[in-house]
Image (cartoon, rainbow, N blue to C red):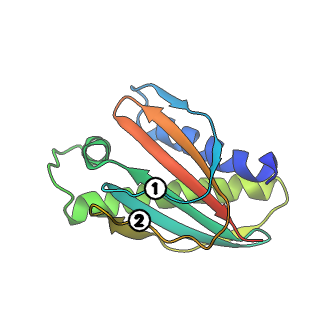
């Protein structure tokens, strides 16, 4: 997959997190191709994108990382993944993906995005993939890691 399609997602995620959390360090890790999504017990938001580029983006973080981020965004202490915490995480994924669409449009690649779906993982569970290669890149933050997985259709 060409970097011109991957970099807009990485750049959008770094930009958006810097906008939300200006007081903490945020650094992208190394991107890699993985054959499947690993088992996860944290929280995951997924969005589909379609148009000139089709696929799916999945955002994952551990519950404690999510609670730190959504507490900061809502300026109130959240100690469980209640409706407000889940909605805030879903919206954060939506904003990052929207920023990705803007960056892709600047490269003459127009996409639309779906509304985010949310999943809270239980031991032994993992998201199903469509058999495509998955690009994985972590973003390291002062709150913990946000892992982003990109899956492009043929």
Residue 14 versus residue 121 in the image, above or below: above
Answer few, some or many: residues within 10 Å of disc 1's Cα (few below 14, many 20 plus, some between 14 and 19): few
The furthest residue to the right: 108
Q: Are marks 2 and 1 in contact (CB under 8 Å)?
A: yes
Q: Which numbered circle lies on residue 126?
A: 2
Foreground: 43 or 98?
43
Q: Residue at x 42, y 53 (%)?
A: 60
Foreground: 108 or 122?
122
Q: Is residue 145 left or right of residue 97?
A: left
Q: Residue at x 35, y 67 (%)?
A: 119
Q: Position of residue 144 (x, y in %)?
A: 36, 36
Q: Quick one: SS at disc 2?
A: loop
Q: Residue at x 58, y 71 (%)?
A: 48
Q: Position of residue 102 (x, y in %)?
A: 69, 56
Q: Position of residue 13 (x, y in %)?
A: 56, 45
Q: Which numbered circle lies on residue 79?
A: none
**The N terminus lies in which quarter of the figure?**
bottom right
Label 2 or label 1, whichever comes before in sequence order: 1
Query: How many marks on residues?
Result: 2
Residue 39 versus residue 68 in the image, above or below: below
Q: Quick one: SS at disc 1?
A: loop
Q: Which numbered circle lies on residue 38?
A: 1
How far, Cα to Cα, is label 2 from label 1?
6 Å
The part of the image, by quadrant, that contains residue 111 is: bottom right
Q: Residue at x 71, y 50 (%)?
A: 6
Q: Is residue 1 left or right of residue 66?
A: right
Foreground: 29 or 26?
29
Q: Position of residue 99 (x, y in %)?
A: 61, 53
Q: Is residue 22 left or right of residue 111?
A: left
């Amino acid at each position: 997959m060409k970097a011109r399609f991957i970099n807009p997602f990485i750049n959008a995620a770094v930009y958006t997190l810097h906008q939300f959390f200006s007081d903490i360090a945020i650094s992208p890790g190394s991107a890699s191709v993985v054959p499947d999504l690993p088992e996860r017990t944290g929280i995951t938001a997924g969005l589909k994108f379609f148009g000139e580029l089709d696929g799916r983006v999945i955002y994952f973080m551990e519950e404690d990382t999510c609670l730190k981020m959504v507490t900061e965004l809502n300026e109130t202490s959240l100690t469980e993944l209640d409706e407000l915490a889940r909605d805030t995480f879903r919206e954060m994924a939506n904003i990052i993906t929207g920023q990705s669409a803007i960056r892709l449009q600047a490269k003459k690649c127009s996409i639309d995005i779906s509304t985010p779906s949310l999943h809270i993982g239980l031991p032994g569970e993992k998201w199903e993939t469509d058999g495509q290669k998955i690009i994985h890149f972590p973003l390291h933050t002062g709150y913990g890691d946000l892992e982003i997985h990109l899956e492009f259709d043929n």
